[in-house]
Image (cartoon, rainbow, N blue to C red):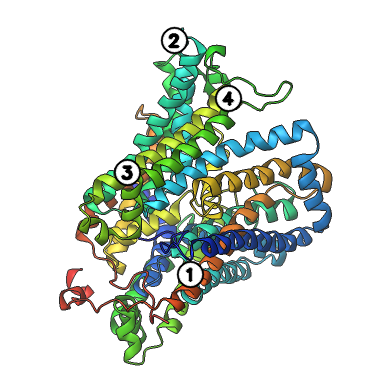
Amino acid sequence: MSDFFDLFLLKTILELSCPLIFAALGGLLSERSGVINIALEGLMLIGAFFSVVGVYYFDDPWIGLGIGLIASAVGATIHAVWCITFRADQIVAATAINLLAGGMTIFLMQRIWSQSGQTTQVKKLPEFWGTVSILVPISFVSVFIVAFLLYRTKPGLRIQAAGEHPQAAESVGINVTLYRYACVIASGVFAGMGGAYLSIGELSMFTRDITQGRGFIALAAVIFGNWTPFGALAACILFAGSQAFQIQAQATGLGISSDLLLALPYLLTLVAIAGFVRRSRPPAGLGQHASTD
Amino acid sequence: MSTNQPAFQPKKKSQLSGLIATLATSAAAVVLALAVGAIFILISNDNPVDAYRALLNGAFGGRRAIAETLVASTPMILGGLAFAIAARAGLFNIGIEGQLVMGSLAGALVGAADLGLPPFIYVPLAIVVGGIVGGIWAAIAGVLKAKSGASEVITTIMLNYLAFRISSYMLTAAAEWLSLIDVLQQATKKVVPDARLPILLDGTRLHAGLIFALVAAIVLWYLLFRTTFGYKIRTVGLSQGAAAFAGISWGRTIILAMFVSGFLGGMAGAIEATGLLGRHYDNRAGYGFTAIAVGLVGRNHPLGVIVAGILFGVLRSGANGMQNEAGTSKELVLILQGLVILSISALAALEFRRRQKRVRIEPTPPPTAADQAPQGAQA
């Protein structure tokens, strides 16, 4: 009995980690290349919504996922154009994308489904081990892929160079603009994957504000994890653990108000950021531009 | 981090041309956003001209409509001011929504407690308490930034979610120990008449909160541009290094700036509760996020924020008319907000670079070897 309970808790934590891991990997890539990306939240929303739109029209969850990822990549491209080409304020641009994503998903939901709370049910991605989505193992494998890319390949080292010292990187012939564009767009794909997990991996529909701040928590995980893939992974599991605890405590009825329990992940994120931020070191070129023309 | 380009150049000679360029940028951004918004209206099979006409009609068609527009503008102006003061100190306060919720909750509780005070004391008291609670809530982010360097962008967002949870908790489970809660309504009990803001225009919902907002803008203008505190805030916002060189305490200044910012946000919430709604409800209007757009369009200048606040009030109050008359979903306004921010940030950046070209700045010096320690070594 207690074995079953532990296994169930483990499963819950793995599932709750999945969207955070995807979004955190996106944030990690973007920030390691030197572009601040607080648009993760909005990009997740876009991915979550357009995946459902895709499944709704094509009746195939994989095509739906593809459409969701394309949409979030387009959203990320806007962020890239604003931050890299226009050199607009990176936080302001991202805030605009977050607001746009929130408004646009509801606007289009009303257009397509004539309701503003949630869409109708659509097909989900394949599942195993009961109800675990295929995206859960993919998220964990992605951590290794990103780590390998970042530390063991030439493009990865160039991404790091672009993030640490864009001027120096440019002076040795690295196309900083190109690498940053690629990383920001990749961050959109990852964030979109995290969003798609929520809509067509876990649920089978899109609901208003489905992401509930997970994009921001993922970004906190990147900082808490010291801008490294495995550090971010550990932080995501920690935050997911606090969510799992909240679900367990609510299910077993500990007698604590559900609102206070629901606040736990956010409180933990706040404490983690406040307590550990000194020890973590952001990429030195974060938010800096390559050349001064 | 710098969240805004300084709205006005320090050089006296170019101040007027700078002002004109600033106004032109804001106006162009709004026009651009409306143009892109028209594409969304077309997507939803409506006629943009009809939709925008219905929007204007909803905002200005008659005495009641105009009153509603001013009612909607009130929290926009206060929220925009909240964003502006933080931005002037180089801080990006995304937590105005949470500060608004905390202020609304606190103001409504004070107003519902029936303290038996005369209205001319009770009304300001409720609003000031709301402001102080919002201010403390925001100051948490300021303290965390000053003490540990935690980015206020993340901490204010987390504080938002915490504020939403506190509000939700207070309106449900807290009823066990707090008699001021109306559980059935999912709200606080009604604010007593002596604590309600008076109505300015008979037969409408236009309350005296608008006067508070306008006075707050003028006070903030004075504070920013005519006092030492304002000078410190602006110096810190322009350059942390210069501030330190001038003997200004960076930490103390940003904590105070966050407090004032949160005070304005909390005030907006308390005014909504004691002026418009008469209670604190748990459903959120999202004014705290619109505040970012208001501050940016007003170029973080208190007087610019008044104009921008009214503009967004027009959008907000016209949205219902647009939905009813032209059938265009009122969520379009949310899209327009995002588009306005997007276009103003691009235009401001381009304008800033155009000015920079005239005054060449030396590139930043290369960092020391210690800054370039390999990342993997710390993992």
In this rendering, which labeled residue sits more in front, label 4 or label 1?
Answer: 1
Residue at image mark 1? B352
What number is the disc on residue B55? none
Q: Do we see residue B119 in this rendering?
A: yes
In this rendering, which labeled residue sits more in front, label 3 or label 4?
Answer: 3
Residue at image mark 2? B115
Return the chain for callout 1.
B
Residue at image mark 4? B275
Q: Position of residue B98 (x, y in %)?
A: 45, 39
Label 3: element kind: helix
Corner quadrant of residue A154: bottom left
- Give the mark, 2 or 4, whose residue is nearer the N terminus: 2
- Give the mark, 1 or 2, whose residue is nearer the N terminus: 2
Tell me how far mark 2 sits from mark 4, CA to CA.
18 Å
Q: What residue type is disc 3 on? A: Phe
- Give the mark, 3 or 4, whose residue is nearer the N terminus: 3
